[in-house]
Amino acid sequence: MAKTLKVALVGGPMYDGLYARLPQFEKASGIRVEIGFRGDHPSLNQHIAEHGRDYDVISTHSKYAPSQAQLLRALDDLLSGAELASFTPSTIELMRYRGALLQLPRLVDAKIVLYRRDLFEDESIRKYFEQTSGRALEVPKTWDALVEVAGYMHQDDEHAGFVFPGKESGLFGHFFEILESAGGTLFDDDLKPAFESDAGRYALETLIKLYKDAAPKALVDWHYDQVAAHFQAGKAAMTTDWPGGYHGYQNSRAIRDLFDVAIYPVGPSGKRRVYAGAHSFAITTSTTDVPAALELLRFLTSEESQIDDARRGSVVARPKAMEAVRAETKPGSREERRLKILEQTMRDCMAIPPKFPTYPPCEDALWGSIRSALLGRLSLDEALKGAAAAVRKAASETPHPQPVSHKGRGA
């Protein structure tokens, strides 16, 4: 009887393409792969919290793995130094928690700006902006300029100035990166909330202005995919997105020849900060067949698999895979500009959340208060104060799992 591995995977337009390669793995290995769950990360995390021990291999993330440490089998004794050396060293470091390697990296995420080039080049739009503002219209270089230009571009929900996720990790991420670009920080050295500050007020006020003056009112119920779909349908002037979603913009009939890319704006501190992290795959401690699970893990993070991800736009963790895709890029193209922007972003601007077990519920507590401020249910200071209290409560009520160093049952 063929071996079967049960897996739980993150799903969505930027992830699903890789899974089409699973039949190749099954044919070559004789191991059947059963996808027991596939969904967005919030749904996946909840499912893993309740049913994680039913799986052999799971999708996870550098910011989520610490909270799952007791479920994840340490990989240090399974992989050689030569194997790990084929990944970017900084990415492998992201895969560690308290010294233990709990995951292998799939791709590295850092956002860029996407904008409608045709709107910014439209002569009537440019002239009116210059007349009313006294300045030339250009792609915003600061968050203050983005607020101004997005408000100017906004007509109605079908012709929005700027779209961004209005809930969950996407909303949190925009607050986090604007906060840091204003010179603030989420937590102090003791991991206590530190965003009740001038920088925190600036970040929240910026999001409130963008929502009120430049975004569809339904945006507070949108996650990443809904935001991308709105821009791809030609209904917004600007947005931000992860590398892995890029193929959706390239393939959009409405805007594929009309959009361009830009680096993130800077904040009032002069810093450019971009919410970032790394998606990964991991083996669970409950697997009964570690060798088979390791074979699948190697396949999912192989050079061939990462080239497949990179061709759809992702920035992957293997330098050789990125080199292969870069060699296919036409000089002077939008794709060449995009890769250069991403390289600069990942070199200089990554804002990576701290790795600690109670991080996920802290993030959830924070975005809920931010959303309430967008909706006008809380004042700016009430939202920040409530968020800090909710974060402290979430941190105190969540267990602190340790990495499991012993070998899994199938080792």
Image (tube, rainbow, N blue to C red):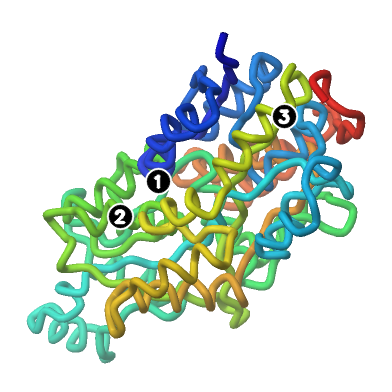
Mark 2: amino acid: His
Q: Is residue 109 above or below residue 350?
A: above
**Local SS, label 3:** helix
Number of disc labels: 3
Relative horizontal placement of residue 90, taking residue 350 as reference (left or right): right
Upstream in the sequence, badge 2 or badge 3? Answer: 2
Q: Tag on residue 138?
A: none
What residue sits right under mark 2 in the picture?
247
Q: Residue at x 89, y 53 (%)?
A: 190
Judge the density around disc 1: few (<14), some (14-19), many (≥20) Cα neighbours within 10 Å.
many
* Picture quarter with the N terminus: top right
Residue 232 is situated, as x and y percent measured from the top left of the image, at 22, 53
Tell me how far mark 1 sits from mark 2, CA to CA: 8 Å
Given the image, on which type of amino acid does mark 3 rest? Pro
Report x, y in % for residue 98.
88, 47
**Mark-to-mark CA distance, 2 and 3:** 34 Å
Give the residue drawn at x 66%, y 15%: 50
Q: Are marks 2 and 3 in contact (CB under 8 Å)?
A: no
Mark 3 neighbour class, 10 Å CA radius: few under 14, some 14 to 19, many 20 or more: few
Viewer-nearest residue: 154 or 121: 121
**CB within 8 Å, label 1 to label 2:** yes
- Observer-nearest residue: 139 or 342? 342
Disc 1 residue type (three-letter): Met
Q: Tell which circle, 3 or 1, labels the residue nearer the N-terminal end.
A: 1
The residue that disc 1 covers is 14
In the rendered structure, are the residues bearing label 3 and label 1 in contact, judged by CB atoms less than 8 Å apart?
no
Q: Nearer the viewer, residue 216 or 42?
A: 42
Percent position (x, y) of residue 159?
A: 17, 56
Q: Can you say which quadrant of the picture contains the C terminus?
A: top right
Residue that label 3 marks: 291
**Residue 75 can be seen, yes or no:** yes
